[in-house]
Image (cartoon, rainbow, N blue to C red):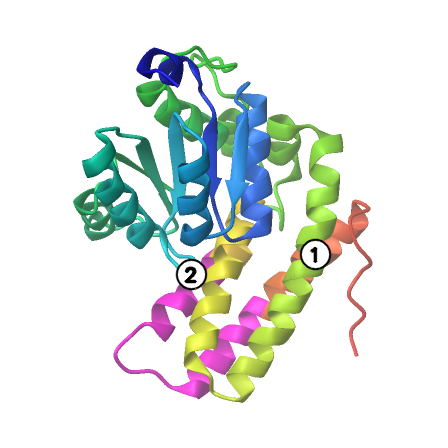
Amino acid sequence: MSHEETETNELILVVEDNSINQRVTLLQLDELGIEAHAVSNGLEALDAVSATRYALILMDCQMPEMDGLQATREIRKREEISGEHVTIVALTAHAMTSDRVKCLAVGMDDYCSKPVSLKKLAEVLRRWLKRPLNFDFTESQSDAKNSEAEAKPVELDILFSVFGKELIADLLVDFVSEADEQMEALREAIQSKDLDTVKYLIHDLKGTSATIYATELSELSFVLEQYAHGETFDWDVINSFFESIEIAWHKVRNYLATNGYSDPVVSS
C-alpha cells in the first residue's frame, strides 16, 4: 500500500479492554461515519498493526497483559525501522497533567480523558484525520442536554441522543450483567483484603459507569480508587466506601430496571 493510499484509508483501531467502553467507542465512531476495528490489549494491538495500516489508534492506557504505554513504545520502535508513523491518541480515566506527560513521553500524539463524549472524540479526530466527520461542531446536542439534565442515576437522555435508543439497549443490559459480577467480585476482594484486585475492579467500574453517564456511581468509584492508591489506608474505611458504592449501584440498577434494561434489585 502506498503512502497516498494510507492517507485516504481512515480506518481506526480501538484498543480497550473494557467491553462496554469498547462498544461505546465503536458506536461513537460509527455515528461519526468512521470504520473501526477493536482489540482488547496491547499485544493484540501489535498484531493488528502488523496486519493492517491504520490512520489512527485510540489507545487505552491501563490494560492487562500489555498496557497502552508499553504498546506505544513497541509500535514506535518498529516505526524506526519502517519509517512510518501512525497517530496514537491516549484514552485514559486519569486527568492529571503528569499522566498526559507520560503519554506524550512514550510517543503518543494526543490525549483524551474518559468519559469521552461524542463532541470530545470528534474534536480530537478532526485534529488528526484528513476527512470530514458526520458531526455538527457548531452545536452538540449531547452537551446541551447534559447541562440541562436533572441528576439521575443514569443519564439515559444523553445516551439516546448520542447513539439512539435501539443501539444502546443491548449495551445497557450487558452493562448490568457485567457490573453485577464486578460488584460481587469487589465485595469478595474487600473481604479477603486483596488490594490489587480492589484497585483493578474499582478502576474498571469507574470507567464503565462514567461511559454510560452513571455519574454518582462513577464519582464514588473514583473516590475509592484514589483512597486505595494512597500511602496509608484502613480496610474499615474501604468497607465504608464500598457500602456507598453499593447504594449507588442499586440506584443505577433499579433505575435501569424501571426503563426495561434489567430486573430490579431485591433487598434481602
Is residue 11 or residue 109 the one in the foreground?
Answer: 11
Q: Earlier in the sequence, mark 1 or mark 2?
A: 1
Question: In the structure shown, which secondary structural element does the residue marked by tag 2 occupy?
Answer: helix
Q: Which mark is residue 222?
A: 2
Instruction: Tell me, yes or no, whether the two marked residues, 1 and 2, touch with CB atoms within 8 Å.
Output: no
The residue at 74%/50% (across/down) is 173
Of residues 99 and 117, the one nearer the viewer is: 99
- Which residue range is magenta in the image? 219-245
Q: Quadrant of residue 248?
A: bottom right
Query: Which residue does the numbered mark 1 point to in the structure image?
Result: 176
Position of residue 155 in the picture relative to residue 79 (left or right): right
Residue located at (29% from left, 74% from top): 230
Q: CA distance from mark 1 to mark 2?
A: 19 Å
Specify the quadrant of the image occupied by residue 86: top left
Residue 82 occupies quadrant: top left
Which residue lies at the image location 56% right of the left edge and 34% below the top edge?
26
Q: Is residue 165 visible?
A: yes
Q: Residues within 10 Å of mark 1 (few under 14, many from 20)?
A: some
Is 130 situated above or below 244?
A: above
| Residue 74 x/y as whole percent | 28, 48
Can you give x and y, in whole percent of width and height, for residue 254 in the image?
74, 57
Mark drawn on residue 88: none
Quadrant containing the C terminus is bottom right
Looking at the picture, which amino acid does disc 2 mark?
Phe
Residue 167 in the magenta stretch? The answer is no
At label 2, counting other C-alpha atoms closer than 10 Å, the crowd grade (few under 14, some 14-19, many 20 or more) is many
Residue 18 at x, y percent in the picture: 54, 53
Question: Is the residue 224 above or below the residue 222 in the image?
Answer: below
Q: Amino acid at mark 1?
A: Val
Locate residue 240 relative to residue 251 in the image: left or right.
left
